[in-house]
Image (spheres, grey):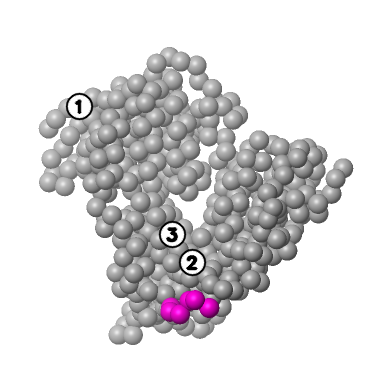
Amino acid sequence: MTETEFDLIVIGGGAVAENVADRAVQGGLTAVLIESELVGGECSYWACMPSKALLRSGIALRAAQNVGGAKEAVTGGLDVAATLRRRDSFTSNWDDQGQVDWVEGAGISLVRGHGRLTGVKTVSVEAADGTVTNLTARHAVVVSTGSDPLLPDVDGLADAEPWTPRDATSAKVIPDSLAIIGGGVVAVEMATAYASFGCAVTVIARGGLLGKEEDFAAELVGESLEKLGATLRLGVSPTKAQRGADGVTLTLSDGGTVTAAEVLVATGRAPRTGDIGLDTVGLEPGDWLDVDDTLLVRGETNHHHGWLYATGDVNHRALLTHQGKYQARAAGDVIVARALGRAVHDGEWGTHAATADHRSVPQVTFSDPEVASVGLTSTAAADAGYEIRVVDYELGNVAGASLQADGYVGRARMVVDEKRRVVLGVTFVGQDVSELIHAATIAIVGEVTVDRLWHAVPAYPTMNEIWLRLLETYGRP
């Protein structure tokens, strides 16, 4: 056994963990990452990057086919093998040496193995060969272990060996047919990608598609999936699964059946906290870690000592890589401030507070059309007690959008707090709308009034003209 001491220990080695450690090192502390799989984590190898690489080729092909002059030049279909090779390049063929080089270059130490808390500020790391390294933190430990797919309690489903999202994003061979259980972001994105590959896709979603978005998002995305050839079975759920010679047969709650070569389960996530030693510090293994806005884990003992933090999926605030990185920056900086006795700015929108997690989280579903949203939906805003006005506009009527695609179909919604006359939420659905969402995020975070937004003039002819059209529809005071 070896004993090693650092200012900061981070359990996890994904993008969020890297950012925590990097901020701490930049602030003058020493830091170590503990990783049992690939350095760079879920986003780099099985989620954000490979999934978007799988989606992009089909979306780009259809975008060309929707523009006169370009569509006449498109003479072939999607090259699936080339798309998979491009995906592989984004994951570096699941080799993390590049990420390891970055970690070393940033002055961060790395210990490979499974990390477990053993007490206050102490962590043991068990390597693949069984050797154990004991680490001690002078100031803080951060849990950044992420989350795992949640398998629903369906008779026979586990025995049917279903795909997880990792299987879908790393597949080397595209099956003839794929049934997808779930209607959220992962389900919709993988349905879009696999339908583009010519796979017969069936989406089974008890709660419909994209239930956390504005209702028109589900409508437009659903119509597009059906045009791609996908079958949507909405309002039903599987009650039984059985793998046979023809694949997996799912029995549905309405009495129908679906048979597919493979079944992808995309019904949610569970915290990866079952075997990280939470019980040694008075916390429940397998639970999400509740944190305050400085990402300090809540709990009487920890708040007295102030040493255990949790960033990313594991705290269940916003299960998105970019939001996890945002938390990581706040956590890394506040750990430095507390370690060095500097002022802590943990009030609303303070340097050390992850305020945006509560009211201004941007998200993009890379379906075709894309769904980009930030802030509160109209339903969420009304439920929260705001006096709101909802403003809708057809994106296809904006000059910039009509230039993007012939017959552009899309929609925008702006939710306004009528008392303060500030924007609470914005949703865009349409081709390339992901590039519009940051302006909406700035408007919401900055609490820019609609009166001031009139002076933010969008360049013509770009899709950003949607802001002018939303404001015109809202009306001047």
Q: Earlier in the sequence, mark 3 or mark 2?
A: 3
Name the amino acid, label 3: Lys
The amino acid on which the numbered mark 1 sits, given as a three-letter code, is: Thr
In front: label 3 or label 2: 2
Q: How many marks?
A: 3
C-beta proximity under 8 Å, tags 1 and 3: no
Which residue: 31% across, 42% down?
13
How packed is label 2: few (under 14 Cα within 10 Å), some, or many (20 or more)? Answer: few
Q: CA distance from mark 3 to mark 2?
A: 12 Å
Closer to the camera: disc 1 or disc 3?
3
Residue 4: numbered disc: 1
Q: Earlier in the sequence, mark 2 or mark 1?
A: 1
Say if residue 321 shows up in the picture: yes
Q: Which mark is first along the chain, 3 or 1?
A: 1
Residue 176: image quadrant is bottom left
Residue type at numbered disc 2: Ala
| C-alpha gap between disc 1 and disc 3 | 39 Å
Check the image and name the residue furthest to the right.
477
Residue under label 2, please give it. 60
Q: Magenta part of the protein: which range?
A: 72-77
Please state, as top left, top right, bottom left or bottom right, where the C terminus lies in the image. top right
Neighbour tally class for label 3: few under 14, some 14-19, many 20 plus, Cα within 10 Å: some
